[in-house]
Image (cartoon, grey):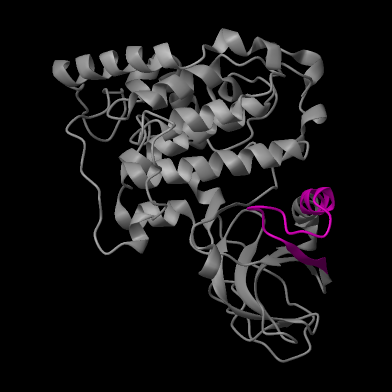
Amino acid sequence: MTDVSLRPLTTHKSRRHSHNTGVLECQTILQGRFRLNGLLGKGGFGEVYAGVTVSTGEEVAVKIAPNRKRHVLAHEADVMRSIQSAVGNADPPGIPTLKFFGHDGDNTILVMSVHGPSLEKLRSEMGRLSLKTVVMLGMEMIDRIQFFHSTGFIHRDIKPGNFLMGVGKHAHEVYLIDFGLSTRHSHSGAWHRGRPTASKFVGTSWFASLRTHQGYAQSRRDDLEQLVYSLIYLHRGKLPWTGLRHTDRTERTRAIAAAKENLSTAQICVCCPPQFEVLLTYVQKLKFDEIPRYEMCRNIIWSILHPSSAGPKPSLTYEWLTPERECETPKCVFPALRGSETKHGTKNDEVARNDSEAKKSLRRRMPTASSTSHTAGKG
């Protein structure tokens, strides 16, 4: 992520600014209302700090950007306001609450509720997550995406780094964040259904849908394809294209796009439960303005742990909340890609045969993509 130096803030208390890093130091007071306690991260827009509301002691997260980049935070604030107005006085389920948006001297600040670590951070610390945990997360992530879509928006940057775990009594909940790239369904290009737009790439190349790489306008189906790649990444700790070596960002994006186009869904989902491939195939076959069958998607993911929906549900306990991890390393690897850092082989015939048989059995029990045509609606 890009380091961003911020210009001095108008504060109600003396504060220091690191000349070496451009990072505001602790105890900075914004608007006389929010105290910064430490840097959480940096991005192309600016910086994110842990903070506290001075009058109440409530912990918050504070995004700060120079006024020349105000539009980025202004758009995110508008999305959050729209979501909050859609639910009235209640807190949006699994969405951070906007606390404040405005100016402070030469900078723009956005203050929101604070939550726990991102799924990317947890994966980084653990290497990869157990299948049970990934299934539990997948159920929560589908809920968040469905709710977000129901408010009229698509996210366009679904990835583990944009999901946070809750804290305290909400420790089992997953929160969707970062709405800077979000747009409304009706603004996502309904007039050019099925045609490439040749528009600028929007999203994160590792997790972007194949159609996004090809220049198509995004819709709800693309958020769900990004979700499948995220689940593979959390379970395997990597994706087939994460080892590609390209120092130039454009070349790297093109190489990732070529990998997604040339690899079969079975190769992309290698070493994963067959349900991952079933879900990937389903979302890739959705029409531009088709409403996804979210409940069916949840059933597909849930069937990984319990094939019979009538059976008892496993306890909702993530592995970082248990004393012992439940993770085993799969004994197979991704297919080889030209330009990757390490040479990957293919999984052995026995594993492939077992996966194929499991997939056939699963597909007999799941609705086909063609059977969802009656759910199509305007985006």
**Magenta span:** 78-102
Q: Return the residue found at the far bottom.
A: 14
Which of 179 and 329 lies nearest the eye of the viewer?
Answer: 329
How many marks are shown on the rendered structure?
0
Residue depicted at 33% across the width and 20% down the height: 267
Give the image quarter of residue 231: top left
- Left or right: 325, with 375 as reference point: left
Q: Return the residue found at the far top.
A: 370
Does residue 237 appear anywhere in the picture?
Answer: no
Vertical relation: 84 (above or below) 234? below
Q: Residue 11, percent across and down? A: 77, 84
Does residue 139 appear anywhere in the picture?
Answer: yes
Q: Residue 263, percent across and down? A: 38, 17
Q: Is residue 367 magenta?
A: no
Residue depicted at 62% across the width and 14% down the height: 372
Q: Residue 62, percent across and down? A: 67, 69
Q: Residue 27, percent across and down? A: 63, 86
Residue depicted at 35% across the width and 25% down the height: 269
- Left or right: 134, with 153 as reference point: left
Which of 379 and 26 lies nearest the eye of the viewer?
Answer: 379
Give the image quarter of residue 63: bottom right
Q: Is residue 87 magenta?
A: yes
Which of 219 and 89 lies nearest the eye of the viewer?
Answer: 89
Quarter holding the C terminus is top right
Residue depicted at 75% across the width and 56% down the height: 73
Give the image quarter of residue 355: top left
- Left or right: 350, with 55 as reference point: left
Which of 146 and 169 lies nearest the eye of the viewer?
Answer: 169
Vertical relation: 13 (above or below) 171? below
Vertical relation: 116 (above or below) 259? below
